[in-house]
Amino acid sequence: MIAISLQSGSNGNCIYVEAGGVKLLFDAGISGAAADERLAAHGRDIRSVDAVIISHDHGDHVRCAGIYQRKYGLPLYTTQRTIDRACSRLPLGKLRDVRHFTAGDTLHFNGVTVETTPTPHDGADGAVFVVSSGGARLGILTDLGHVFPGLQPLVASLDAVFLESNYDPGMLECGPYPEFLRQRIRGEGGHISNREAAELLCSAGNLKWACLAHLSEQNNSPDVALRTHRAIVPKILPIHVASRYRVSDVFSV
């Protein structure tokens, strides 16, 4: 299994996973042109993708889904509430091939499975994902809300993970956000902090690597996030950071 972060953050999210001949995109928050170009930089063709799986209805995860379908012919997998809310708020255009799942379902793609788990994040009906193939398990865990029951054992079951590490509490407290937004971010439906993410990684003894994802532009930085994790997580675990602006290297699981 290989994985590539095409972009990660409030300005747009999209992750590519390839396993057993199956090619999947998770979220469609960056333009089709950007996704096409960034996949091509690693020798992949967006037109060969088998499905686009949407995590929730916020624009940074779904706003370009219509282009992915109409221009590249990719089917969308989403919960009913997610696509209904997205269509009511965003100009997605006509969608011809939408396939629904319920958060908690397992999706099957020619021997590759995608387990979906509901989250308390404040989207309409959010989910996170675990891709399994050939005994390897890759987690795509962002927009978590908070460290909800079941999250720690889920992380502990993985071989590799893209894990939300959204904010540094000190930067959030002293930053430019108004109090209502600070409360939303650190609340039950918001995001998890660098320290919370690091503590989750400490419980995961089988991980080959972790990639920190969905870092806040205002309330975090790659250096701050890495410093926090390195102070807590065993040094043996490789830790990467998904960029808000660039495609990542190819990660193997």
Image (cartoon, helix red, strand yellow):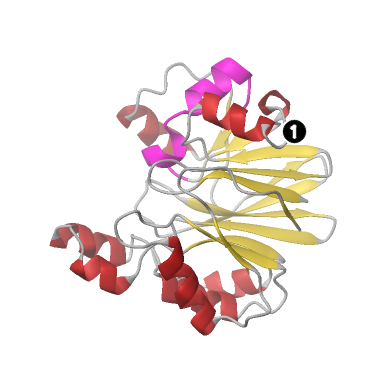
Q: In the depicted view, which residue is nearer to us: 248 or 213?
A: 248
In-image side of 35 versus 24 (left or right)? left
Type of amino acid under label 1 = Gly
Q: Which residue is mark 1?
A: 43
SS for tag 1? loop
x, y percent for residue 49: 70, 31
Q: Is residue 188 above or below residue 20?
A: below
Quarter of the image where one finds residue 48: top right
Quadrant of residue 74 within the rendered picture: top right
Q: Which residues are magenta?
A: 56-75
Q: Main secondary structure of the magenta part?
A: helix
> Which residue shows up at 74% across the image and 43% down it?
18
Residue 194 coordinates in the image, percent (x, y): 43, 71
Q: Is residue 204 left or right of residue 146?
A: right
* 73 is within the stretch colored magenta: yes
**Which residue lies most toward the front here?**
223
Is 189 displayed left or right of 177 in the figure? right
Q: Residues within 10 Å of mark 1 (few under 14, many from 20)?
A: few
**Residue 173 can be seen, yes or no:** yes
Residue drawn at x 60%, y 28% as measured from the top left: 37
152 above or below 84? below
Q: Residue at x 72, y 68 (%)?
A: 208
